[in-house]
Amino acid sequence: MYNLNQPIEIHKWFLIVNPFAGNKNFKKSWNKIKYLLKFNNIQYSFAFTQYKKHETILIKEALKKGYRNIISVGGDGTLHHVVNGIMKQRYIKTSKIKLGIIPLGTGNDWIKTYNIPNSIEKSIDIIITKTTILQDIGCIKLSNGKKEYFNNLAGIGYDGYVVKNLNYLKRIGSLAFIVSGLYSLFFYKKKKYEIKINNLSLNKKCLMILVGLCKYSGGGLQITKDPNPFDGLLDITVVKDFSFFV
């Protein structure tokens, strides 16, 4: 475990680990991760998340202590909270922080854009190479004035309803997205939204609105048309209707 009173090296990795991510046997996966990190001579400390959004607190504490290399161990939700912790802290420029991921989640959609394998061994291999990219991050200003950041995409409407129902279905694994999607499709009622982009205004009754940086969501679906996580622009998709049946 990590201890804020212990001296650290700036090149040492700090792992933020979600022991509840996905439906896998966490103990077995965690033992494998520790073995591979040791085998590859990767120095690290770690902390387990204990409650929702605990990642943001752990990030701030780690950065204050001097860590600059972070690994998110979990799924898209864990990564989302880690990214928010990085973006909301004010101790160091975000460009000076390296973020790696070891996927243990249900959907693991963000890694698909970068062809990162859904594999503990191969994701650690990528971390070892220290190959980095600088990606855009989206920002949402909430009604309470607070900001929320996203590294993949943000959804309004049906998309949010699916994620809400997904929380009850994660135990069934990758099928959770399909089951939640089908259930939500029958019970979600379309709403009317107003979209304003520069001088353009659009009023539409639709199923959902997706604001994307990366390609995939919902366990591998590609609904955003042509997102580019490096061009400084957002891909906005308005979905009127949607069906899993062809």
Image: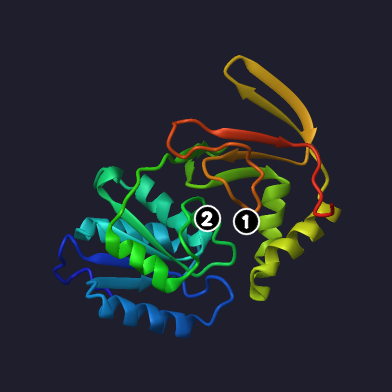
Cβ atoms at labels 2 and 1 below 8 Å apart: yes
Q: Viewer-proximal residue, 91 or 175?
A: 175
Q: Which residue bears the numbered disc 2?
A: 112
Where 135 sits versus 185, above or below? above
Asked whether, in this view, residue 230 is left or right of residue 36, the answer is: right
Q: Earlier in the sequence, mark 2 or mark 1?
A: 2
Q: Residue at x 52, y 47 (%)?
A: 152
Q: Amino acid at mark 1?
A: Gly
Q: Residue at x 54, y 39 (%)?
A: 144
Residue 108's disc is none
Q: Quadrant of residue 178?
A: bottom right
Where 104 sits versus 189, above or below? below
C-alpha span from label 2 to label 1: 8 Å
The crowding category of the residue bearing disc 2, from other C-alpha atoms within 10 Å (few below 14, some 14 to 19, many at least 20), is: some
Q: Quadrant of residue 227?
A: top right
The answer to whether residue 42 shows anywhere in this view is: yes
Q: Amino acid at mark 2?
A: Lys
What x and y, as percent, mark residue 204?
77, 29
Q: Residue at x 51, y 50 (%)?
A: 113
Secondary structure beneath disc 2? helix
What x and y, as percent, mark residue 61?
28, 60
Secondary structure beneath disc 1? loop
What x and y, as percent, mark residue 45?
27, 72
Asked whether, in this view, residue 144 is left or right of residue 182, the answer is: left
Residue 220's disc is 1
The crowding category of the residue bearing disc 1, from other C-alpha atoms within 10 Å (few below 14, some 14 to 19, many at least 20), is: some
Where 19 sits versus 101, above or below? below
What x and y, as percent, mark residue 114?
46, 52
Asked whether, in this view, residue 158 is left or right of residue 96, the answer is: right
